[in-house]
Image: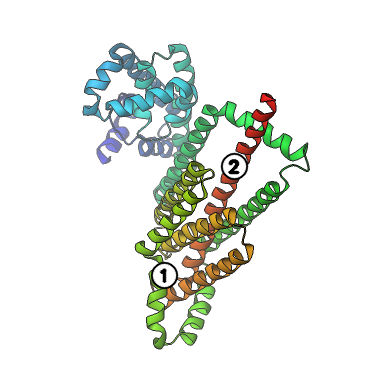
Amino acid sequence: MNALIHLLNEYGYIVLFFSLMLELIIIPIPNEALMSYVGVLAFQGKMNLILSILVAGLGGIIGASISYWIGYKLGGPFFKKYGRYIHMGPEKMEKMEHWYSKYGKVLLVVSYIIPGIRHVASIISGVIKLPFRSFAVFSYIGVFLWAGTFIFLGYSLGPKWDKYQGEIKKWLVLASIIAGIAVLAYIVIKANRQFIKESMKLIFHATFKRYKSFVKVKILLLFMLILFAALFALMIGMIQDFIANEFGHFNIVFRTLVYSIFTPGWSGIISIVYAIASVKVLSVLAVLTVLIVLLNRKNIWLELLFFAITLIGTLLFSTGIHWLFRFLFSNKQISSHFPDQPAMFIVSIGGFLLYTLFRHRRNYHAITILLVLFLGVLAAYSVSVVSIQTAEPSDIMAGYVFSGAWTSGMFFALEIFRFLSLLKKEQNGQESN
């Protein structure tokens, strides 16, 4: 990178032009940092801001166009055979071809902002024979947005760029993640547009035009929605407090109470309670949940699917948010266990087990007792973790809240699908009559 900066200082626009062009012909160059530095040079009066954006954009669109025609002329068979040597193997090509055949225009605009995607975006467009006019319009817009954003960012910060470039890089990575999630959500929604449209019509009609039908289901859905909204709002509040380091007093008070009440004589019981979060215990609870679903014989595959999504989502959510907090706030003294992953799994697995029992067993007195017992287990586990000193009290509370928000969201989605199944069965029955 230092050599590239030196060349930029010597040859200016020529280096900028060829750097952008070559990167978009699958040659990895750290152009975000380069373009940001160009912005700093523009601030210092050594380069012109508008001309820099135009030169960068021109180099980018020429590189993108060359990549497009490479893909167009060589075609899919060539890349499926030799693509693995440039990280474009058959599986990656097939996935990209499928996405671009459906959503190519939208992906082209945002793909140049995302590292790793912009290097193959133009080639894939050529491989799938996307009309060059469509490719040019959307890809050129994406190239200029990419170049203009980073150059203007460097220009805006000026001499403060060296001071803030680390933080800016972090937030740009976060913005890229958000953009990727938004694109994925768009793709999923568009792919299932007809199903979503029909489902929304059925739910709207059943909710607002048939007041006395499915009353219990509607009450349950409303309760789940309120629970999810409350836990989600609480989760956002806890994140804000965590970033502001406002859990210190809470942690001190909680630890003081635990240490004063639970003396060393409780160590045996505390060790047993702490084992609740072990893989063995959680696996037993997970198997028990699956057995209850199978024995019930109603919506088996739907419930098993949502249980699997809940578990996988808990793992990805907890791992992802740990990485994100460490990445964004590496310069702060923050807990590395926020939110506590074992606490999240206790809530997701135990919560799904309780919900399955509540949904399929009508003994509400027993369910109420189990719910109180479950809350007691959560409290006991919190005490055990603090006693053993493996995490802060706020980490445990956050684990419960984060997992509660995720799991209640899954419950709400599960009930929506179950409700749709009932509505469609009723609709099919009416049509057959």
How crowded is the residue under tag 2: few (<14 C-alpha within 10 Å), some, or many (20+)?
some
Identify the residue position indicated by label 1 in the image: 391
Q: Is residue 156 visible?
A: yes
Q: Foreground: 213 or 79?
A: 213
Image-based side of 255 in relation to 231, left or right: left
Q: Quadrant of the C terminus?
A: top right
Image-based side of 321 in relation to 30, left or right: right
Q: Quadrant of residue 147?
A: top left
The color scheme shown is rainbow
126 shown above or below 189? above
Label for residue 328? Answer: none
Identify the residue position indicated by label 2 in the image: 418
Residue 34 percent coordinates (x, y): 35, 36
Mark 1 vs 2, N-terminal side: 1
Q: Residue at x 38, y 82 (%)?
A: 267
Label 2's element?
A: helix
Q: Amino acid at mark 1?
A: Ala
Closer mark to the observer between disc 1 and disc 2: 2
Q: Quadrant of the N terminus?
A: top left
Q: Is residue 388 visible?
A: no
Q: Amino acid at mark 2?
A: Arg
290 shown above or below 212? below
Distance, label 1 to label 2, CA atoms, is: 38 Å
Image-based side of 9 in relation to 310, left or right: left
Q: Foreground: 360 or 230?
A: 360
Residue 355 percent coordinates (x, y): 56, 56
43 shown above or below 402? above
Label 1's element?
A: loop
**Number of marks drawn:** 2
Residue 305 percent coordinates (x, y): 47, 43
Q: Foreground: 50 or 311?
A: 311
Residue 127 percent coordinates (x, y): 35, 17
